[in-house]
């Protein structure tokens, strides 16, 4: 399962975002380090279910009238303050928790209502643009310190006749979530001396930065967009590559209103209907949230998950079935399972995602939409429904 981490300084709204995205109860407070131990839960990427191409809807609990929700892991860790890579605040714990994340959602307080330490200040007093590069800078310095501390081992290994710097770095950096393929890609972009004993600090620093970019892609959430001063959202968009305006509090209110059957809303919808039973105050609050949704196309929470999964991590959703005609499994359930695969994945990759035994016994696959056998090298596309034929 994909693992996404929520990062940011304290009190930027990470825990509210986490609660809205997972509906798991956590402490939400207006003070730094509300979160100490990481919260882990399940959120969902939203896509169009293939059942919309059939006469009936599927049997999955994760499908709502053709809106398919595919599970991903989401976790919220302690807030980051300046100097975290040196252990300030809960920095080391925070950075260690990021090692297994596939991507990072950086939550920024777009309202400027919290300073760099995460302490409340007047709205607009702090410039949120200053927070944009903050996480990347701390992570780069943290990784650089790990590399520097272990560099003597690399130098010692380099004396061996069969020394390979790719292998040595991969062995060193596996613990921070880097693979051999990641190391190889990063070294191709880096200009460096062949002899590790000739490396300077600048080489190790650049290695750390490239490694962070490769292994921990990041988007920025301009949270509290509903109360952000004029111009803040646009300036954030100019400061970061991918910025999504959001109101985590608004999304949380909608999810709770939906659970209470006061509104008709599915995560990611661009509008909702309000039940006649709501009070005047509730209606006013909901209408204010609707105005934010109208301006930005949503609350930003679902868009953030989708952007990371489908755009940044370049995943597709594929649906394995046993009956290619009815699109059902062995219990006659229609499209019960959905898997997030790397773009470019083949039917055999899907087989292994279902179960290693299915992958090992793989024989061939059938495109259930077209009703024909497909080649082993066929690249799957978003929404493909595939029958795997296996000896297991």
Image (cartoon, rainbow, N blue to C red):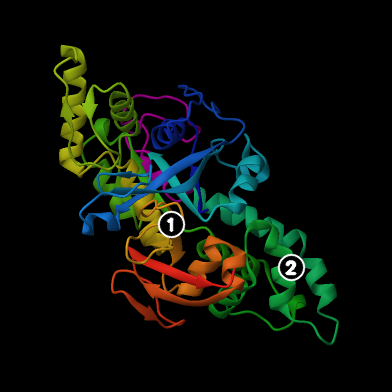
Q: Quadrant of the C terminus?
A: bottom right
Magenta segment's dominant SS is loop
Name which residue lies at 58% across and 49% down: 98
The residue wearing badge 2 is: 171
Residue 112 sits inside the magenta stretch: yes
**Disc number for residue 280:** none
* Measured Cα–Cα span from mark 1 to mark 2: 41 Å
Residue 195: image quadrant is bottom right
> Helix or strand or loop: what does disc 2 sit on?
helix
- In the picture, measured across the screen, residue 374 lies left or right of residue 124, that is right
Image coords of residue 2 (percent x, y): 50, 54
Q: Choose mark 1 or mark 2, whichever is in front.
A: 1
The residue wearing badge 1 is: 329
Vertical placement of 119 versus 197: above or below? above
> Helix or strand or loop: what does disc 1 sit on?
loop
Judging depth in this view, the residue of 4 and 217 nearest the camera is 4
- In the picture, measured across the screen, residue 22 lies left or right of residue 36, that is left
Vertical placement of 193 versus 7: above or below? below
Name which residue lies at 85% across and 81% down: 159
Exactly how many numbered labels are in the figure? 2
Residue 11 sits inside the magenta stretch: no
What range is drawn magenta here? 109-134
Image coords of residue 209 (percent x, y): 55, 63
Vertical placement of 218 versus 199: above or below? above
């Amino acid at each position: 399962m994909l693992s996404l981490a929520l990062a940011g300084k304290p009190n930027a709204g990470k825990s509210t975002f986490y609660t809205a995205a997972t509906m798991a109860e956590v402490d939400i407070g207006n003070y730094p380090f509300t979160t100490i131990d990481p919260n882990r839960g399940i959120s969902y990427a939203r896509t169009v279910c293939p059942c919309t191409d059939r006469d009936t809807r599927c049997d999955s609990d994760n499908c709502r009238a053709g809106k398919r929700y595919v599970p991903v892991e989401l976790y919220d860790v302690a807030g980051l303050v300046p100097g975290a890579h040196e252990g300030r605040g809960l920095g080391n714990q925070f950075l260690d928790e990021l090692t297994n994340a596939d991507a990072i959602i950086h939550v920024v307080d777009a309202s400027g209502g919290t300073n760099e330490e995460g302490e409340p200040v007047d709205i607009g007093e702090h410039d949120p643009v200053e927070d944009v590069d903050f996480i990347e800078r701390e992570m780069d310095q943290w990784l650089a310190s790990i590399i520097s501390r272990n560099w003597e081992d690399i130098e010692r290994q380099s004396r061996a006749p069969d020394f390979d710097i790719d292998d040595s770095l991969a062995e060193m950096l596996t613990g921070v979530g880097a693979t051999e393929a990641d190391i190889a890609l990063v070294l191709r972009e880096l200009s460096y001396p062949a002899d590790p004993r000739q490396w300077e600090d600048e080489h190790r620093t650049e290695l750390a930065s490239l490694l962070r970019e490769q292994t921990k892609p990041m988007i920025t959430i301009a949270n509290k967009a509903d109360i952000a001063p004029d111009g803040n959202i646009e300036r954030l968009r100019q400061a970061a590559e991918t910025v999504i305006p959001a109101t985590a509090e608004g999304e949380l209110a909608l999810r709770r209103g939906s659970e209470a059957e006061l509104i008709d809303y599915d995560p990611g919808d661009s509008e909702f209907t309000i039940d006649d039973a709501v009070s005047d105050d509730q209606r006013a609050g909901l209408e204010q949230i609707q105005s934010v949704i109208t301006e930005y196309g949503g609350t930003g929470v679902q868009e953030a998950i989708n952007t990371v999964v489908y755009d940044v991590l370049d995943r597709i959703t594929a649906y394995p079935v046993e009956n290619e005609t009815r699109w059902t499994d062995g219990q006659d359930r229609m499209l019960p399972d959905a898997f997030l695969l790397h773009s470019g994945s083949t039917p055999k990759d899907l087989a292994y995602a279902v179960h290693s035994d299915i992958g090992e016994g793989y024989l061939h696959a059938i495109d259930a939409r077209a009703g024909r056998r497909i080649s082993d090298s066929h690249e799957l596309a978003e929404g493909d429904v595939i029958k795997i034929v296996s000896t297991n």
